[in-house]
């Protein structure tokens, strides 16, 4: 069986990942290029007596860009490691895609062009003369609609019998000549539907309300939908935990070690998984649906002026939105920003928007301390207050971006061409692969790496005693004066510090400290939580200060690890840790002073 290496190239939003998934199925994995933070996917496909090793390159508009993604794609194509460069182009806007075809053909003539989304083009009244296009380019060209499988069998056949071209210098025809000769458009405005929708979703009147409404809907679906699988996972882990404890007991493991394993490592680990996994498994598919539909670039368009006025990059709007699901994913998403300076600004400010791990605490504290009444208006009022906190996070993102761009990261904001791709029906199979495998499980894996050892540390602090006082009590007493200075107590400060593995365990650590249980402690209901916290001296001011700290504090351990991997620098990781923490402490200090005065 012969093996052929294929590099899959193309602009973003052309269905390249759909082609890759359709060809490779589940025979694929993702990883980083050696020595780089840029990820790529590899997979294998088989046709007759041929095995294809397919490398899915990052989306690129050009091979000469300084963007890490586009630079990595260009370097791989120039390396000659691939036998064939398979370029995927969008049939609905072929003219723009031909720029990349021209760049790649200047490097190699071992190229096949797959004109994808041909079905979408036909709906818009766009027809392409594939034979004429093939003749003018001098390379094999095939039309396809990867979502429905149309043309993929012909593509596999073409790849299996392809013979490499000799190195011949041939002039690339004018793109204008290619389009005039090969593309026929029935309508004067084939993208009229897209422009009509854009006049609404990118307008100054409706653009921002629509963005906010969509964000609220996504949060509502995520938080309400995550409750049931979270409860099911907790029950499953409790059942498995009982079996594991029985197994350890029967193996004559000492009670102290059993408690360390079960009450420390196992409880923390399963807590993080059961609380993190369901929201991410819901949020990321919803986020990817908006991405596939074509709405995310419209968000960047709406917020471009705001970020540009702060010396930042318009694409930071997209990475900020990703941070609402998980700040670690938001940091990874900063790779789409070409400028290293603006990429750092986006990384350093990403955790100013709350991730899904902070929402349970935000919602619980708003419901029991901030909204003083019950009835039908309680939920809408709490939702409006939560939206206010979210907006404050966005405003703080802009303010800190401005501060960074005028101090340690001075420089002029770069310009960029923002593509508004056609609206398309999302590819739900592709969404599952991208959102669950590439994002959810990747982030969860890093969270597990941080949570397991942290669980052991938390248990040791709570169960190691000097005299009758635990190490944890000594720590909370040490932080008590600092806590009082900012309107909270030592337990709250300790809980945030020990909550570094995951934001989800901050409230359980507080309850563990207040109730002296020696292990993470959950609350059965909001009323029970309110009673417990009130009995421990919580007031409206305490709750408001904790809400501020929930919004503005250091990134979780998973995000810190991701920042270190993305920047390759402990200095920038430390700065990403310090900036939001100092911001939250200063705001709490100001709040405490105001309460003491008034």
Image (tube, grey):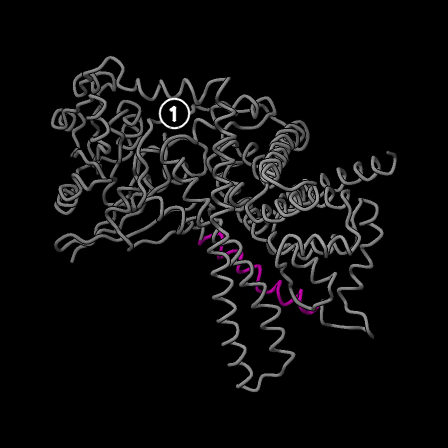
The kind of secondary structure element at disc 1 is loop
Q: Residues within 10 Å of mark 1 (few under 14, many from 20)?
A: some
Our reading of the magenta stretch's main secondary structure is helix
**Direction right: furthest residue:** 597
502 or 22, which is in the foreground? 502
Q: At which x and y percent is residue 130?
A: 14, 28
Left or right: 51, with 591 as reference point: left
Residue 574 visible (yes or no): no
- Residue 308 x/y as whole percent: 56, 23
What is the count of numbered marks? 1
For the record, the magenta segment spans 441-461
Provide the residue designation for mark 1: 420
Instruction: Tell me residue 316's x, y (percent).
Output: 52, 32
Residue 529 is situated, as x and y percent measured from the top left of the image, at 68, 55
Quadrant of the drawing holding the C terminus: top right
Q: Residue at x 26, y 42 (%)?
A: 19
Q: Nearer the viewer, residue 576 or 207?
A: 207
Q: Is residue 91 above or below residue 110?
A: above
Question: Residue 182 magenta-drawn?
Answer: no
Please indicate whether residue 32 sits to the left or right of residue 312 in the image. left
Residue at 51% over, 44% down: 325
């Amino acid at each position: 069986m012969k093996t052929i290496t294929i590099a899959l190239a193309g602009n973003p939003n052309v269905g390249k990942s759909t082609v890759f998934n359709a060809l490779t199925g589940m025979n694929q994995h993702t990883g980083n290029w050696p020595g780089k933070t840029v990820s790529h996917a590899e997979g294998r496909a088989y046709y007759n007596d041929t095995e294809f090793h397919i490398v899915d390159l990052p989306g690129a508009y050009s091979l000469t860009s300084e963007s890490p993604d586009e630079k990595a794609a260009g370097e791989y194509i120039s390396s000659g490691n691939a036998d064939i460069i398979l370029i995927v182009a969008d049939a609905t806007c072929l003219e723009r895609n031909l720029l990349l075809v021209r760049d790649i053909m200047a490097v190699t003539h071992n190229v096949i062009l797959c004109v994808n989304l041909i079905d979408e083009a036909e709906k818009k009244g766009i027809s392409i003369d594939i034979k004429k296009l093939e003749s003018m380019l001098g390379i094999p060209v095939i039309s396809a609609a990867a979502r429905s499988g149309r043309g993929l069998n012909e593509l596999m056949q073409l790849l299996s019998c392809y013979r490499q071209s000799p190195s011949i210098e041939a002039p690339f025809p004018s793109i204008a000549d290619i389009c005039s000769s090969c593309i026929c458009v029935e309508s004067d405005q084939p993208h009229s539907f897209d422009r009509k929708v854009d006049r609404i979703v990118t307008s100054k009147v409706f653009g921002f309300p629509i963005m906010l409404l969509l964000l609220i809907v996504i949060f509502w679906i995520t938080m309400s939908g995550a409750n049931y699988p979270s409860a099911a996972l907790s029950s499953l882990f409790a059942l498995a935990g009982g079996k594991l404890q029985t197994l350890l007991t029967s193996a004559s493991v000492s009670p102290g070690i059993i408690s360390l394993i079960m009450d420390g490592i196992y409880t923390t680990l399963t807590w993080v998984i059961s609380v993190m996994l369901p929201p991410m498994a819901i949020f990321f598919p919803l986020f990817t649906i908006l991405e596939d539909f074509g709405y995310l670039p419209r968000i960047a368009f709406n917020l471009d002026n705001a970020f540009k006025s702060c010396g930042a990059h318009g694409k930071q709007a997209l990475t900020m939105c990703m941070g609402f699901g998980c700040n670690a994913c938001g940091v990874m998403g900063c790779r789409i920003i070409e400028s290293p300076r603006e990429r750092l600004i986006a990384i350093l400010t990403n955790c100013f928007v709350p991730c899904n791990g902070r929402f349970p605490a935000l919602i619980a504290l708003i419901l029991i301390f901030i909204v003083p009444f019950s009835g039908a208006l309680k939920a809408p009022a709490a939702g409006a207050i939560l939206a206010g906190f979210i907006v404050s996070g966005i405003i703080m993102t802009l303010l800190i971006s401005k501060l960074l761009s005028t101090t340690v990261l001075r420089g002029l904001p770069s310009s960029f061409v923002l593509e508004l791709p056609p609206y398309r029906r999302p590819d739900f199979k592709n969404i599952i692969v991208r959102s669950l495998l590439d994002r959810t499980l990747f982030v969860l894996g890093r969270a597990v790496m941080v949570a397991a050892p942290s669980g052991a540390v938390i248990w040791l602090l709570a169960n190691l005693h000097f005299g009758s006082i635990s190490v944890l009590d000594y720590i909370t007493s040490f932080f008590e004066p600092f806590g009082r200075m900012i309107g909270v107590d030592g337990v709250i400060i300790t809980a945030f510090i020990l909550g570094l593995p995951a934001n989800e365990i901050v409230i359980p650590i507080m309850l563990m400290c207040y109730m002296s249980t020696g292990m993470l402690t959950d609350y059965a209901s909001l009323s029970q939580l309110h009673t417990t916290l009130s009995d421990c001296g919580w007031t409206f001011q305490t709750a408001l200060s904790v809400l501020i700290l929930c919004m503005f504090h250091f990134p979780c351990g998973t995000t810190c690890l991701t920042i270190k991997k993305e920047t390759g620098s402990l200095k920038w990781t430390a700065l990403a840790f310090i900036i939001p923490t100092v911001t939250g402490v200063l705001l709490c200090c100001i709040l405490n002073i105001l309460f003491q005065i008034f």
